[in-house]
Amino acid sequence: MLVILLILLLSAARTHAHAYTAAELSAVGVEHNLVPVLVIGSGPAGLAAAFYTARAKLPTFVVHGHEPGGQLMGSSWVENMPGVEPAKGYKIIEDMQRQAVNQGAQFLDGSVELIERSTSGNYFMVHIDSGLKINALTVIVATGATARILNIPGESVYMNNGVFTCAVCDCAQAQDKEVIVVGGGDSAIEHIMHLAPYAKRITLMVRKDHLRAAPVMQDRLKAYNSVRVLYNTAPVAIEGDGTTLQGVRVRNTQTGQESFMSADCVFLAIGHIPHSGIFANLLPMDAEGYIHLPTRAQKTIVPGIFVAGDVADRIYRQAAVAMGDGSKAGLDAIAYLHEYGFNEQLSAELAPYYLNF
Ligand code: NDP
């Protein structure tokens, strides 16, 4: 494989910390579809990373993924983005995408279905479900996570219009409202802490006869007079008039008896699913699939792979944090390539081999 020749040179550059020379390059042939920076995922983390790497004049491609733009695309008003006036989620994504494109980033439709590390370990063969195969010198994983939903009737009808999955993002929707929070873990308690200053009353709906949240978190509930905990209760349908949510049909998990409980808003705090499955053979992750980052940088234990955003963040899960992670991942990828001898001259000489549309 001709790419291997290039990669051997990359290895040499690493060892000897020198830049490539034209003479070296003349001995190098490379396959097509070479990409110095491949960003997987087009949410806030991926777009911030692409903005940074493209601005550093590194040819950068972004794979959109199954959910182009990520979770913000489905968000209602985003009111917690420092420096940004309240805006619709899709508008923030549009602006970020435009910024990245203006710097030269290019976008690919489809999702990555397989990523393999070359035998030398110096580049990555990335297969996209469109059939495209890419040889990437660096990969920034920004595939995000999805909030778990209940998959019950009515849920999709009122999603982001009465049913929400992020209290920090949508707490203002609870102003003077009757609110149900579904879940029994730490996230559910955190939802209550964010919603309590706004809501008229909150019912924490727990399907078991106990909370899973840590005792210290459960203790915090005692500070809220407006909160009650309803055990052994699970939602079976979200109900309303087709436009406005009016309540939840619930089932007592011990007796099986169903009843209707009125509410204005329902917040789901039943966990998240990180999109990390395709990296399982490459990167260490915890039992729930969050990718492990060994340091405060965005680099992983695999040289050349960087991770940003919710796919590695079980705690914050905020767009603003993902953007910060993405910016760091971009900077880490830039430093990595520069350290390994990638420079403007090399880039110009490799241009014929770059992925081209
Ligand atoms: P968890 O998986 O810990 O809890 C999810 C909760 O949702 C459980 O009580 C579960 O019930 C309930 N649930 C799941 N599916 C349904 C359903 N279909 N209907 C009703 N209830 C359902 O998720 P979290 O997001 O709360 O936390 C994830 C991880 O992040 C945890 O490790 C947590 O400790 C951590 N975290 C830490 C925080 C902190 O330290 N400040 C803050 C937030 C999260 P059941 O118990 O019956 O399975």
Image (tube, helix red, strand yellow):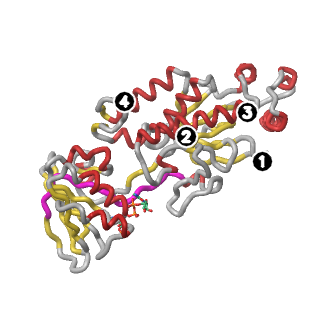
Where does residue 357 sit, x and y in percent of width and height? 59, 24
CA separation in Å, label 2 and label 4:
26 Å
- Front of the two marks 1 and 3: 3
Mark 2: few/some/many CA within 10 Å (<14, 14-19, 20+):
many
Does 266 lie within the magenta span? Answer: yes
Looking at the image, tell me whether mark 4 or mark 3 is earlier in sequence order. 4
Q: Secondary structure at mark 4?
A: loop
Residue 271 left/right relative to 259: right
Kindly identify which residue carries mark 2. 40
At horizontal 23% and vertical 55% (from top left) the residue drawn is 266
Kindly identify which residue carries mark 3. 339
Q: Secondary structure at mark 2?
A: strand
Please say if the residues under marks 4 and 3 sit with CB atoms less than 8 Å apart: no
Amino acid found under the numbered disc labelled 3:
Glu
Kindly identify which residue carries mark 1. 119
Q: Secondary structure at mark 3?
A: helix
CA separation in Å, label 1 and label 4:
45 Å
> What span is colored magenta in the figure?
261-276
- Front of the two marks 4 and 3: 4
Quarter occupied by the N terminus: top right
Looking at the image, tell me whether mark 2 or mark 4 is earlier in sequence order. 2
Q: Secondary structure at mark 1?
A: loop
Q: Using the image, determine if residue 104 lies above or below residue 160.
A: above
Q: Which residue in the rendered view is the most extreme toward the bottom?
A: 255
Where does residue 43 sit, x and y in percent of width and height? 45, 38
Does 89 lie within the magenta span? Answer: no
